[in-house]
Structures are given as C-alpha cells and as structure tokens.
Image (cartoon, rainbow, N blue to C red):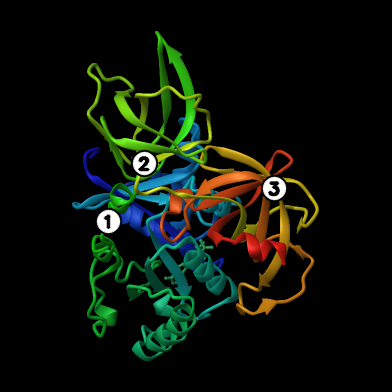
Amino acid sequence: DAKKEILKIVVVGHVDHGKSTVIGRLLYDTKALPEGTVEKVKRISKETGKPFEYAYLLDAFEEEQRQGITIDITQIQFHTQKRNYVIIDAPGHREFLKNMISGAANAEAALLIICANEGIQEQSKRHGYILSLLGIQKIYVIVNKMDLIDYSEIKFNQIKKDMDKFLNNLNVFPLKYIPVSAFNGENITKPSDKMKWYKGKPLLDALDLFEKDNALEDKPLRFPIQDVYKFDSRRIVAGRIESGKLKVGDEILISPEGKCTKIKSIEGWNVKKPLKEAVAGESVGITLEDEFFNKRGEIISHRENAPSASDFLKVNVFWLGKNPLVKNKKYKIKLVTQEVEGEIHSIDKVIDATTLKAIENVGEVKTNDVAEVTLKLKEKVVFDSFSSNPNTGRFVIVDGYDVCGGGIISRAKTEEKYNT
Ligand code: GDP
C-alpha cells in the first residue's frame, strides 16, 4: 500500500545474536516475501541437508532484489495494517555504518538484538554507543533466543538491568525490552504461551507503537543549494529541502555570505502550476527577488533562524578508512551540498566503544575507532549542531576518492580557543 506511512528501522546487534532470523521471521509472518521464496528456501535446505533457517529467507529476498533494479541501499520491506516498514540495510553489510553516518540511510527507530544466552557482548555495546551518537532515540532492545534460557523471566530481567545500566550512561533509554525466540516464532506476531509473565505486546504489534515524528518539517528551514540553472531569463535555485518549509514571499538569508532577499516563486518538478509552499524532503527550484550570484553549497534559511557558520569545529567521528585518520593531512569534508578541504587540528579523545573509556594522547584514529576531534577547514561551512538538526549536523570525510568516515558536529569552537 503506497499511501501508508513509512517508518524506517535499523536492526543492529552482535553477530549471530539473531538479526537475520528476526528479520526473516517478520518477513515470513507478514507474508512480505515474493511468492515461492519460502518453498524454494525450504527445498534448497532439504537438498543440501542443512536445517531450514529463517535467516536464509533474508538472503533469498536480497537476491531477488539484486536481480531487479539496482539500489544502493538494501531495503527490505514489510507492512502491518498501520504502516509500511523499511528495514534499512542488512546487518553485517560493510556499507552499513557508512550509510548510517552519511545519512543515506536515515533510520528513525532501531532494534538492538541481544542473545539471551550470551548476554551483552562487545558489539552490543558498540552498537548501543553508535545509536546514541546517531541520536536515534526510538530503540527497542530485543532479547532473542529466549528458548535457550528456558524463557526465564529472571534471566531476562538481569539482561535488561545490565543493558539499561550501560545505555542509560550514554543517555540512551530504550522504550522497551522484548523477550522473543525468533527461531520458534515466540512473541514475534502473537503473545507467547511460554512467556506468560511478559505483559507487553509482541514485537510486530510493538513496532506499531513507535511514534513517527514529522519533526524535520517543524524545524527551521534549511535549503542547501544544489545547483543554479538559467532558464529563460530566470535563475532557478534548485535543491532539496532538508528541514522546515518555505513559501512564496518568505524573507530569506543565504549563508555563509549573509545575503538577504525574498522568495519570488517555487517551481516543483513535474507540476503545471507554480507552488505556493514546499516542505522538508521535497526537491524544488525557487526564484529569488534579487538575483545574487548564488552557488552550490550555500544554504538558504529564514532570516530570523539562521544556521551557524565556522571553519573550526568540534566533532565526533567514526573512522572506517583503511589508513588511520591523522593530523597534517588534507581531507575533504562533505556536508549536505558543501565540499570543503580540511585538516585535523587535534585529536582530543579516542574512545574505546566497548568500555567507553577514553584513550588519551593518541596520535591517530584507527579503523572502527570513534573519536572526538577538532577540524580546521579551509573555508567556513554552514551547519547546525547534530542535536538540533541531524541533516545539517553531520558530514562525511573523504580521503582521496573514498568516503572513509563520518561525523556529527557537537559545536563550533570559539576563535580564542583556537589560538591557545
Ligand atoms: P545474525 O548474525 O545476528 O544475523 O544472526 P542469525 O539470524 O544469522 O542467527 C544466528 C544463529 O542463531 C542461526 O543459526 C539461527 O538459527 C540461530 N537463532 C536465531 N534466533 C534464534 C532463536 O530464537 N533461538 C535459537 N535457539 N536460535 C536462534
């Protein structure tokens, strides 16, 4: 159903704790799989003598998708009566973190899967930490493989207590802890007879309780310029509205130069009449009362609610590059449509994502490390702090031609600080 509301969720957790099985189960139980997939997978399992795995359904699903149109992010979909769910990226994919950091995959909610038997592992903590940095607040912790601990309420409560202790420290407060056995289908789509002590909803019903917020539309206007086209005698400023809304007649400010003018018209793609208003998520072209020499990278906001601009930023980075992130080297920073050259001014703290202990005096950020660094850029970039606006508060770092990391901006550093 194309008209239904869409909620994007990401599924994370330690390897083998059951991410694929949970997803496979959800696809199976909501009949989201292409016809014949289940039979095919069952047949192959039988032929190869391997026991049937729900996780294989996910592989089969992805295979079908690959044969169709090319998509850069694996998107798996299923639906309930209430809405369509898109599972962003598949667990274990190399691109996962990159997509999350770059915003290519804008997850609104997360399921953090923990195996009841093994309990909290290094990766469970790391993923919890990443969710906290990404600012995903709608989180359910799914305690899977309850069958392996005899569906014990006591053991479930212990895991819940331990995980809460860790996550609350990061200012992450999971909305629910749900005990399931994905393999046996317990508490996935219907309440489990084996866990009568659990009073909450089964997983699928609980998903519908995630509240969708349209917060982006309510945030201040951020319209990064992608391109300026000359059309007849007009100049059309085109881009995607990252947040807020704009309408004809609005007084606007173009950062970082601080030019002010008014919106003369809004031209949508494929519309017959000019539009009166456009909102976050839409790609539009606008014309302005005064035709300055506008260019890609500038950001349009309302006059009274402008973003910040600085060439000196305090940021959190996730580093995925093969080579470490180091000082005295030039990197390219991409923030919405802006591209600026920059260097690491200082590596302030490297954080071990498992213990969350800071490692002091480290000269480099290695692959998979998370760090607090200060960036010195060649020119000012226009931005918001990540907590106030995720789309203009994050960036990716390019080393040569490769996206090697990403980060979120905590704040601009003051000039005085820079000089010390
Ligand atoms: P992933 O690496 O997190 O995606 O984990 P998988 O979904 O591939 O699951 C790893 C293994 O755990 C597979 O052999 C599954 O069959 C098994 N598994 C998953 N869920 C359950 C469960 O609820 N109970 C039991 N006993 N095994 C499970």
Give the quarter of the figure containing the C terminus. Answer: bottom right
Disc 3 residue type (three-letter): Gly
Give the residue type that dot 2 points to: Gly
Inspect the image, locate mark 1, and give the three-letter code of the amino acid beneath it.
Lys
Residue 383: percent from the left, percent from the top? 50, 49
Mark closer to the chain start, 1 or 2: 2
Instruction: Name the quarter where the N terminus is drawn.
Output: top left
Quick check: 231 left or right of 268? Answer: right
Whether pointer 1 and pointer 2 mark residues with C-beta atoms closer than 8 Å, the reply is: no
Q: Is residue 285 left or right of residue 318?
A: left
Q: Which mark is residue 342?
A: 3
Foreground mark, 3 or 2, reads: 3
Measured in 3D between alpha carbons, the distance from the residue under mark 3 to the one under mark 1, in whole angstroms, is 37 Å
Residue 358 is tagged as none
CA–CA distance in space, label 3 to label 2: 52 Å
Mark 2 highlights which residue? 36
- Local secondary structure at mark 2: loop
For this orientation, the residue located farthest to the left is 81
Determine the residue positioned at 64% across, 64% down. 416
Report if the CB atoms under discs 3 and 1 are less than 8 Å apart: no
As drawn, 404 above or below 186: above
Where disc 1 sits, the SS reads: loop
Residue 146, horizontal then vertical, whole percent? 40, 78
Q: Residues within 10 Å of mark 2 (few under 14, many from 20)?
A: few
- Location of residue 235 (image quadrant): top left
